[in-house]
Amino acid sequence: MNHSNHDPDLIFSSIEVTQFIQTCISAVEGLTTNPLEKRKLLIMQFSLRVLYNTQASMFLISNNDNGTVSCILRSTFEFLCRGLWLSLCATDHQIDFFIKNDKLTKQRNVGEPGKSWEVKLGPMAKEIDERLGSMGFPVKLHEIFEQNKKVFNSLTHGGMAILTKTYNGKNVTNTFGKKDTLLQSYYQLLMSAYATTSLLATFEKHKLAEDIVKHYIPINDSLYGMVQE
């Protein structure tokens, strides 16, 4: 097993994103609701799961354990999309159906004809983007899904995606190349920003949401610039 040396850019990105995630967690951990407010409760649960997952992921990235991060990237992305879809797009019937059956149905109301097909991740991300776009948010989720859907599927089922990234021609490692590692950090940052601002907006904490966006933009720009190099 071989681990590469720490790169200054990777150390910077992991520290900056970790601090941002902690800011997000601090902003939302004190929020409260009751079981009857199902929409608020679900977005709170899903958003905090995203933040806790990304916090753990950045700790792993800072220790060059990128392979482990990849194994939970798909589930974190799906937590984010499901939480946002239930909060922003779902009807009351769809929320109740999810709570009862642990499935996301396309049927928007009780008694609609046809089978209660489950909403797939790609169309879900596209619908969220359309909703967020109308609210002035950046639309990135469907783009991320389209760029990574084959990788997501491979990661979910223990496929070759991660194996090809962790063999350098001589050693088996748990460390990705610099660009892949920066891209992981970029995705974690983006998911944390989406989860936090959407949750705060749901609870009408608009000033806090604006502060999170102001904190997010310069880190995003720096990290995105590194990814594009």
Image (cartoon, grey):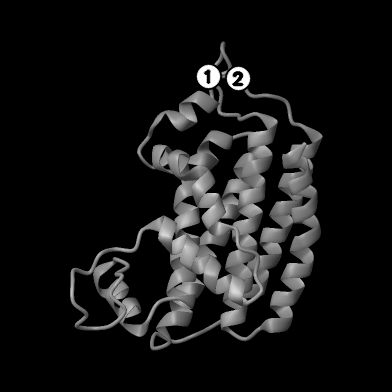
Circle 1 residues within 10 Å: few <14, some 14–19, many ≥20:
some
Query: Whole-percent x and y of residue 53?
Result: 53, 54
Residue that badge 1 annotates: 172
From the viewer's perspective, is residue 128 above or below residue 5? below
Which label belongs to residue 89? none
Q: Nearer the viewer, residue 20 or 95?
A: 95
Quarter containing the N terminus: top right
Left/right placement of residue 94 relative to residue 146 reads: left
Q: Which residue is mark 2?
A: 2
Determine whether the residue tagged by mark 2 lies in a helix, strand or loop. loop
Going by the image, does 32 lie left or right of 219? left
Tell me which residue sits at (79%, 68%) in the image: 214
Residue pictured at 47% horizontal, 26% vertical: 163
Location of residue 189 by image quarter: bottom right
Please state which amino acid type lies under the numbered disc 2. Asn
Q: Badge 2, how many Cα within 10 Å: few under 14, some, many 20+?
A: few
Alpha carbon separation for disc pair 1 and 2: 7 Å
Give x and y (percent) for residue 225: 78, 45
Q: Residue at x 53, y 34 (%)?
A: 67
SS at badge 1:
loop
For the image, the number of numbered tags is: 2
The answer to whether residue 29 is visible is: no
Amino acid of disc 1: Val
